[in-house]
Image: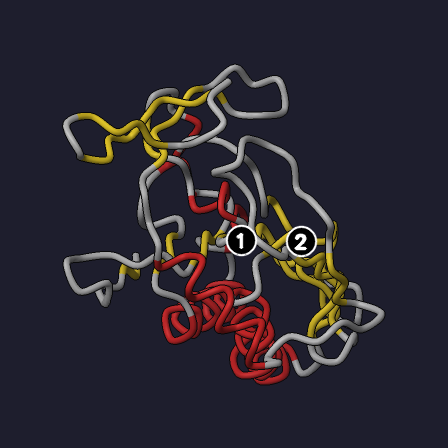
Amino acid sequence: MPSVPLRVAFGILVPVLLTGCGGTGQSFIAKDEPWRATEERACLASGAVRESPFVKTKLSLGGPSVCGAERPFEMAAADGGRVTLSPVAYLRCPMIPQVNNWVVNTIEPAARRVYGVPLAELSIAGSYACRPINHASGSILSEHGHANALDVSGFVLADGRRISVKRGWRGDYRERAFLRAVHAGACQEFTTVLGPNYNSLHADHFHVDLARRGSDGLKTVCK
């Protein structure tokens, strides 16, 4: 397996196909993206993320050198530990405050407004995974491979009620209202938000990430 993601050809950095971890056998294209390290180091230096009983540093996430993060975290809960992430999510520094903001500013208020009870848990369908986009071998490395994405499949309220993205997106009026509010709020916190209206691959979860898109890195996607 190559130890670096790029090969120099005629003085130009060229993406190289690497094989993903976890025994998937899937190959992916890894691009040279200096902004990732710069952004992560700035986040770490800012003190925006501090270790706690529910946010802990991970020494390694595994995978080729292009996967993972410089200092990844294990996030077990948001909102001061009150809202559990089940299972825990493995994320890079910039994702932690945005997930917390999404919970505090959008999901919790929506739960109280629509159902009259607090939010208790996010059902996590995926976080870090060293794999190509949509598991399509030969495609570009997914934001999940950079610990820069989170998939949420449902929500558990304090009264034990479970709201599934798959069943609730076209469910009763309260499920629809809650999930659409959650989706809209995610678009205020993340640069990419994909849900059931995007395609069949996202019919059962919300995908959120902080990828930089477009020539200026400011393009956002909310679908």
Vertical arrangement, residue 160 with respect to residue 205, above or below:
below
Q: Position of residue 41 (x, y in %)?
A: 51, 67
Q: Residue furthest top?
A: 25
Does 112 sit above or below residue 155?
below
Tell me which amino acid carries mark 2.
Answer: Ala
Image spot of residue 51 (x, y percent): 76, 72
What kind of element bears circle 1?
Answer: strand
Against 150, is 43 above or below? below
Residue at figure coordinates x 72%, y 64% from the top left: 121
Residue 69: image tag: none
Report the number of numbered marks: 2
Q: Say which label, 2 or 1, has the lower sequence index.
A: 2
Side of 152 where 182 appears, left or right: left
CA distance separating discs 2 and 1? 8 Å
Dot 1, how many residues are within 10 Å of its Cα: few (below 14), some (14-19), or many (20+)? Answer: many
Q: Nearer the viewer, residue 104 or 41?
A: 41
Three-letter amino acid code at disc 1? Leu
- Locate residue 48 relative to residue 12 in the image: left or right: right
Dots 2 and 1: beta carbons under 8 Å?
yes
Which label number is shown at residue 89?
Answer: 2
Query: Residue at the spot x=48%, y=73% of the render?
Result: 42
- For label 2, the SS is strand
Q: Which residue is mark 1?
A: 150
